[in-house]
Amino acid sequence: MNKLPVFEWFYQYGDTLVTVATQMDVVDVPPQFRNQQLTDFILGRVPTPHMIADEKGITAPMRFGGALYNCVFPWESVVQIGGANAVIQFKSDVLAATPTEGVALRPSAPVKKQRPNLRVVK
């Protein structure tokens, strides 16, 4: 599947969340992300102004801890693209080849107990 038109559609509406299988050899990311199965990256005009998306994939200079790193995400490593109103998940042979017993594709955030807005002050 050609993921470039999907990415361009999301990108025109603002910041785009791209989920990448960072353990693939073709992906170039900082070392701290290489041991994670999936990593989310936010791409947009403000966070990544010099990003290039073409038929091969996405190349984006990004800052991590103040240091600039030129990230490369080939399309075969992109497993999900999302924006403010929608998310598209792609079937991935990469994830099927990796053992995922008991592991959710996207870990859910822990539910925080809501505190009441009003408190009694004595």
Image (cartoon, helix red, strand yellow):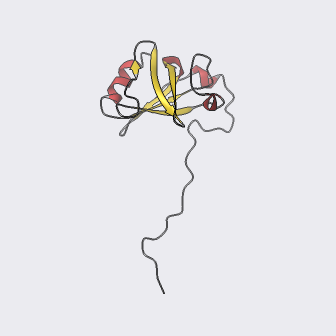
Name the residue: 60% across, 21% down: 94
**Where residue 48 appears, x then y in whole percent?**
40, 29
Looking at the rendering, which quadrant does residue 9 occupy?
top left
Identify the residue at image location x=42%, y=71%.
117
- Of residues 112 and 33, the one drawn nearer to the viewer in this rendering: 33
- 10 displayed left or right of 103: left
Position of 39 relative to 3 (above/below): below
Say which of 92 and 36 sits in front: 36
Q: Is residue 93 left or right of residue 3?
A: right
The percent position of residue 37, horizontal first and vertical second, equals: 62, 30
Asked where in the image residue 6 lies, by quadrant, the reply is top left
Q: Is residue 39 visible?
A: yes
Residue 50, given in percent of the width and then of the height, sits at 38, 24
Q: Quadrant of the N terminus?
A: top left
Residue 38: horizontal and vertical position, in percent? Answer: 58, 31
* Residue at x 54% of width, y 59% of height: 112
- The number of callouts visible is 0
Instruction: Single out the residue that lies furthest toward the top.
Output: 55
